[in-house]
Image: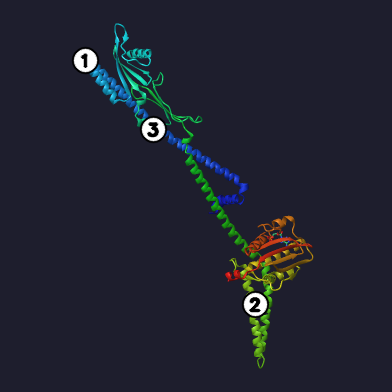
Amino acid sequence: MRQVQWLVMKPLESFLANPLRRGWPMLLAWLLCCLAAAVWLINEESKTTREDFETQSRILHRLLTQRAEQHEALFAALIALERSLPQMSPELSNKTLQSFVASVIASYPQVTGVQHHVLDASTQKWNTPEAVSSPEQFSAALGLALRDGQAVMPDAQGFILLRKSNAHSVWSLHVRADRLLNADEQPLPGITLNLAPDAGPSLWRVAAKHQVWPSLEPLHFEKHLAVRSQPFLMTTEQARLPEQLPWSQFMARVLALMGFWGAAVFALTQYRQRVLAQRQLELAHASRINSMGEVAAGMAHELNQPLAAVLSNVQAAVRWLQDDPPEVNDAREAATAAAKQAKRAGEILQRLRSFISPQAGVREAVDLNEVVTSALSLVGESLQRRDVSISSRLADALPAVLGERVAFEQVMVNLLLNAADAMEANGTTKRQIHIETSCVAERLQLTVRDSGPGLTAEVKTRLFEPFFTTKPNGMGMGLGLSICEHIVQQAGGDLSADNADGGGAIFRMNLPVATKTAKAKNA
Ligand code: ADP
């Protein structure tokens, strides 16, 4: 847990303590995180796109191979039919051929025509029954088919496949390329498909319906159709388009990251506030304990007097009871006085206990004059030993303020000891502290003025900063005034400091008068 605090919490805490100065590396780290997430996302998405593209390409390849196999089967049937024709009468053979072609065209939508070409042995000319888009090319293709057994030539609508049957007979199959695939088998809009023989122009091309994004290389697939007599190369390409990138997912993740970041900052702020509050509580307690030395001296002095009175009263009572006859009335009076003094000593001790106790005190209507008297009873003795003389002008019938009595005493003790410290450190010969209380326009004011060195410009601005101290060698923790300010602010007031006219420092505590309703609410 401790390591976690040092490794994680402390750096983050320090970042939160000064986000402007230390914020940019964190922001940079965050941006890098976002960038890494974006790269990862795009990569993942590209993988999926590639897989989808390859699956689609393989499906297209299988379908086109199937169609090529159909063409093969057709040629085989035509050649077989041709062989049986001579045994038939010319009329029957013509009829048979026509009905076969009609059935082929009906069952294979891509086949738009079937023709039989016979080479006239005497003229060496082909009896080409129908005109084609390019008769010369067609004749050349027929010659090629006769030589090699097969040929292909592009046509306005697709391509013509030619297959040799015997030394003077060639069959041709007119294929309409855009019917090679059914409506539900067409390539996806982003894919470009091309079918071409190894040498020669394209037989069929379907262009993608998207614009290509030039900065990205398109996905590519190529494979020959798995039919030996039609080994056409099928190629597919798919452009990687910006709109195919997962922008919405990316934005969602960036937002999620931002949310996570916000939550982390919020949690850390909460954590820091808790730690600070805890620390402040501990320090307030420590500061009270620190003042204990001074306080104990004052206490000893305070207790001395009631205890001495108890002793002398009890001794007198014993003496009067030993008289003959015993002076019972006098003895009773002395015993009563002793009991009163013992009670006072008890109250003083109670005050000491509550002064050093760490728990929050009770809010009550407090008389500032009493706070002054009480604080002086705590540290008056110590101040006297340090040659500090105290004077005061306390207002009569001062209205009460609502707050913690002990906390106000702590403020007062702190102001008195600070004044004494400043005068001692400065070597002031005439060490004086003057305390005043007053009430003007529903505001109570308590001032503590000393005859010390006063406040330099730097001290004045940093006075209430926690841990700011000018006291040497750990003599001061620099927390006294920040705690005092906190206490006064808690009671709805403010604490300020200035240089007094005629030298020295003057601390002013301004507090609101406790209203009746506030008092009642608190009761
Ligand atoms: P600490 O007493 O531990 O130094 P404080 O918060 O009580 O912490 O005081 C902070 C600083 O304020 C002191 O170190 C001192 O420099 C300055 N200071 C406080 N009171 C006076 C005073 N009466 N005169 C001059 N300087 C003072």
Q: Earlier in the sequence, mark 3 or mark 2?
A: 3
Q: Earlier in the sequence, mark 1 or mark 2?
A: 1
Asked if labels 2 and 1 touch by Cβ distance under 8 angstroms, the answer is no
Residue 105 occupies quadrant: top left
Mark 2 sits on what residue? 344
Q: Nearer the viewer, residue 181 or 113?
A: 113
The residue located at (47%, 35%) in the rendering is 243
In this view, the mark in front (1 or 2): 1
Image coordinates for residue 119, horizontal then vertical, percent: 30, 10
Instruction: Identify whether 8 is placed above or below 232.
Output: below
Asked if labels 1 and 3 touch by Cβ distance under 8 angstroms, the answer is no
- Amino acid type of the residue tagged 3 in the rendering: Thr
Image coordinates for residue 305, horizontal then vertical, percent: 69, 77
Secondary structure state at the residue bearing disc 3: helix
Secondary structure state at the residue bearing disc 1: helix
Mark 1 sits on what residue? 91
User: Real-space Cα distance between discs 1 and 2?
Assistant: 145 Å
Secondary structure state at the residue bearing disc 2: helix
| Crowd band around label 3 with a 10 angstrom C-alpha radius: few (<14), some (14–19), many (20+) | few
Mark 3 sits on what residue? 55
User: Real-space Cα distance between discs 3 and 2?
Assistant: 97 Å
Asked whether residue 323 is in view, the answer is yes
Asked whether residue 291 is in view, the answer is no
Image coordinates for residue 298, horizontal then vertical, percent: 69, 71
| Crowd band around label 2 with a 10 angstrom C-alpha radius: few (<14), some (14–19), many (20+) | some
- 402 with respect to 472 (left or right): left
Image coordinates for residue 470, horizontal then vertical, percent: 71, 57
